Amino acid sequence: MTRAEKATAIEELKEQFSTSPFFYLTDSSSMTVEQISNLRRLCFAKGVQIKVVKNTLAIKALEAQDESKGYGPIFDAFKGNTAIMFSETANLPGKILKEFRDKDGTKPVLKAAYIDTDVFFGDDKLKELSALKSKEDLIGEVISLLQSPAKNVISSLKSGGSTLSGLLKALEQRGE
């Protein structure tokens, strides 16, 4: 790979890291070509981009990012063969890995995951990562929780209003 090609690859990775808030690092070295192709198809179908990169280029691209993102700890995971799964949803790559493993075994191995300045290391975190709720799920839960008390108040007022009007009618009839 020439210097120009390396510089281009680093620039592409910089752009990818800056636009993808979540990414997972996996080791797919012991997988067959067919398994890797199946994983790529599954990722493509679900909207996750998977890219095999040289570790040094990925580290250089991450070093060029803003330090407030906290990429430093994940550098240790860039050893051996590395495939990066980029996503807009935090739990989607975890769900894909879990679904893929249910079909094809225990590969690829999760090395690390970067979720909003937090870094998760190790394959044992896959269950936890795939169970994370997406932003849309959390917003939906908050909205339903906020609507619940309002619905209770409105239903209480409606039932109270009919009781009150019935009481007023009864008092009016007595007065006549």
Image (cartoon, rainbow, N blue to C red):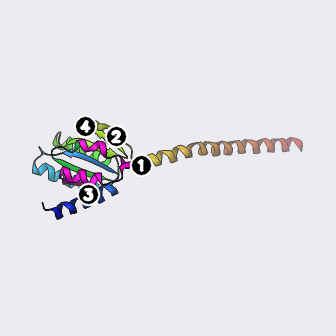
Mark 3 vs mark 4: in front: 3
Pointers 1 and 3 in contact (C-beta within 8 Å): no
Sequence-first tag of 1 and 3: 3
Question: In what element is the residue under mark 3?
Answer: helix
Part of the protein shown in magenta: 48-76
Hey, what amino acid is under mark 2? Answer: Ala
Q: Position of residue 12 (x, y in %)?
A: 25, 61
Circle 4 residue? 122
Residue under the point 26% across and 42% down: 112
Query: CA–CA distance between discs 1 and 3?
Result: 25 Å
**Direction right: furthest residue:** 176
Query: CA–CA distance between discs 1 and 4?
Result: 24 Å
Quarter of the image with the C terminus is top right
Q: Position of residue 172 (x, y in %)?
A: 85, 44
Question: In what element is the residue under mark 2?
Answer: loop
Disc 1 crowd rating (10 Å Cα; few below 14, some 14-19, many 20+) is: few
Judging depth in this view, the residue of 167 and 16 nearest the camera is 16
Residue under the point 24% across and 56% down: 44
Q: Is residue 87 left or right of residue 144?
A: left
Disc 2 crowd rating (10 Å Cα; few below 14, some 14-19, many 20+) is: few
Q: Which mark is residue 131?
A: 2
**In magenta segment, residue 96:** no
